Image: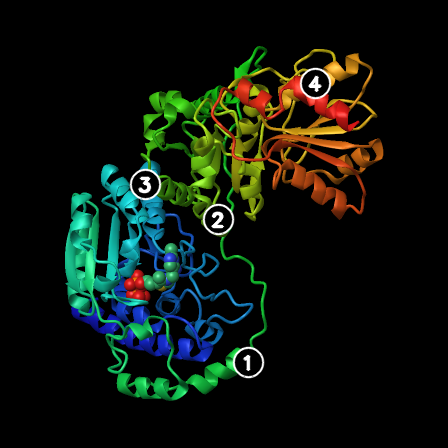
Amino acid sequence: MTKTELISRITQQAKIARQAILQMTTLSGSGHPGGSMSSIDVILSIYNIMRHDPKNPSWAERDRMVFSAGHLTPAIYSSLGIMGYFPLEDAIAQFRTYGSIFEGHVEREVPGVEWSSGNLGQGLSAATGFAISAKIRGLDYHNYVLMGDGEQQKGQLSEARRFASKFHLTNLTAIIDYNQLQISGSIHDVMPQRIRQNWESDGWQVFEVNGHDVSQILTTLEEVKSQEKPVMILAHTTMGKGVSFMENKAKYHGSTLSIEQCQEALKELGMDFELPRYQKMRDEFKPQNQPAHIDFHPKFDLKPGKPVLYTSESDCRSAWGNAILDLGKINRESSNPIVVVDCDLAGSVKTAAFEAELPERFLQSGIMEHHTAVMSGAISTTGIQCFWAAFGVFGINEVYNMQRLNAINHTNLKTVVTHVGIDVGEDGKTHQCIDYISLARNLFDTRIICPADANQTDRVIRWLIDKPGNYFVTMGRSKLSIIKDSENEVFFDQDYCFEYGKADVLRTGEKGTVFVCGTPAGRAVKAIDTLREEGIFLELVYVSSPLALEANMISEAVRRGPIFSIEDHSIHGGLASSIAEAIVGGGHQARLIRIGIEAYPVSGTADQLYEAYQMDSASLIKRIKAAL
Ligand SMILES: Cc1ncc(C[n+]2csc(CCOP(=O)(O)OP(=O)(O)O)c2C)c(N)n1
């Protein structure tokens, strides 16, 4: 096809797309027509030169197009429909209707969509994830990301820009729909910024184009591929482009046309008004549970290696670091690379040895956790088994919304968080992550595992290595005693196999039940053993999967008598809440004594703080006896 023919094809497609944008937004009475009309010429130009196959949306070597401005669904669905990913009329008729995949903001459930978005400022991070994944896996696909200009106000974008520059992501092109309007009016009034200079100073090459001149757009898209830096294209556009009464009006960012206005607009565009037909299709549409068009959770072909036995006091952090180093080495040639991501804490989160041994699989992402959470999530959708290690407050609290977005995107990220609870050294309350379980609790499709000691940590990491889905693995900072059984043998020995959701009975007894989770495990064992010496026999259960308590564990505990929960976590939302939920949910009645954190703690060594918060073994003995 000659360039002239291509321009004429895109121009014709853009007319059909504008017709679709206006009809779907009018039909649903909601949505964002203004930015959709300003960005549509650029979007269609990209889809016309991209390497992709609408009949095989998950083709591994396809170019990726990420929509960071997730509200531009009218333009996105129109383009994908025109390209043949699905019938365009379905998207028009079902737009934003209950039970359809064509939701208000863009979702991966729609064929052709690479990343669900809606929280502005995150798409560039996702696109860098796809771009660096291509480099790691030796693939030559290109990555595009479309953003709004108001969106440029988000700080996470600067994190992502720096990352792309540092890793020379020349397979990445960002496009800004520069219509100079956002919800509240002019972008220059809402929040002045120097968009071009910001990108240039972060090491990007910037091109400016007329975003409605298809010829210019195509020429620039051709040029970007030969640049030695990642490229940003600032596309000068007009909000509401194509309909005179909509042009340059901020109102149309998120306001739709009435039926009469829609008729008038389509007349100006020279396109047919077909709303009655789509209205009928919409009325007849039955909510569907459509099967996902791709397998979001592929199998990872990775070997777990041999368990390591720790017999003397060890920290879980080192056990994790040793395990991931071993797994990285034995799986070096796997088609599913293992990648470890760090945010300037490698020494503390024990990934420095992995970095030294496998530098090509290690990403130093700096103090840019918001970007890192999304970027790592995107990497984990591409067949890479991605581990991001950080402190609890940075890997969970700091980036809660990014982890939520990962869950919505069906990612496969393994976030390993150290320094949780009060076992963080003397760093004080800003660094004490006492809500790791309660935050994970809110995330669907996200699991949390809290190993008891170095041995269980080793088994958990090896078990995880071929698992899809999102997981948090949590651990403290200090060296902990190795958990032993009542015969003084290592409990989590080489024959122990971790199973998600299975709790471990460390001691048996009939006087009551103590459930413990996290770093207090060793102190709890010591307390229960001392009580045994005094003739008080309590069942002691270690709960490594606090969001998946087995029902029978609770019914048996209820039969035994009082129930205690011990955790290095707020007494709200953690293990205690899981037990309370299971008691009530199972129709039982029981007494639950919650031992945990009840206010933001202070600085101190772990031993000092355990004593201060009455969770050392002597205090546990006293509290248990008092309650009994
Ligand atoms: C993090 C976040 N904050 C706020 C919003 C609400 N919101 C949706 S679109 C928008 C304005 C975006 O402006 P711009 O990027 O210029 O897009 P355009 O108006 O051109 O469509 C806002 C504030 C959001 N989606 N995400």
Q: Pick the quarter of the image with the N terminus.
A: bottom left
231 lies above or below 309: below
Tag 3–tag 1 contact (CB < 8 Å): no
Q: Mark 1 highlights which residue?
A: 283
- Does dot 1 land on a helix, a strand or a loop? helix
**Residue assigned mark 4:** 527
Foreground tag (1 vs 4): 4
Residue 7 or residue 418, whichever sits in front: 418
Residue named by callout 3? 132
Picture disc at residue 404: 2
Residue 2: where, in percent of width, then height?
A: 18, 67
The mark nearer the N terminus, 3 or 2, is 3
| Mark 3 vs ligand 1: CB below 8 Å | no
| Marks 1/2: CA–CA distance | 33 Å
Rendered-image quarter of ligand 1: bottom left
In three-dimensional space, the C-alpha distance between marks 3 and 4, rounded to whole angstroms, equals 50 Å
- Determine the CA span between mark 3 and mark 1: 44 Å
Q: Disc 4 marks which amino acid?
A: Ala
SS type, badge 4: helix
- For residue 34, side relative to residue 509 (left or right): left
The crowd level at tag 2 (other Cα within 10 Å; few <14, some 14-19, many 20+) is: some
| Residue 617 image point, x, y percent | 66, 18
Front position among marks 3 and 4: 4
Q: Secondary structure at mark 3?
A: helix
Task: Tell me whether the residue at label 3 lies in contact with that at label 4, contact meaning CB atoms closer than 8 angstroms.
Answer: no
Circle 3 or circle 2, nearest the eye: 2
Residue in front for this viewpoint, 336 or 23: 23
Amino acid type of the residue tagged 3 in the rendering = Ile
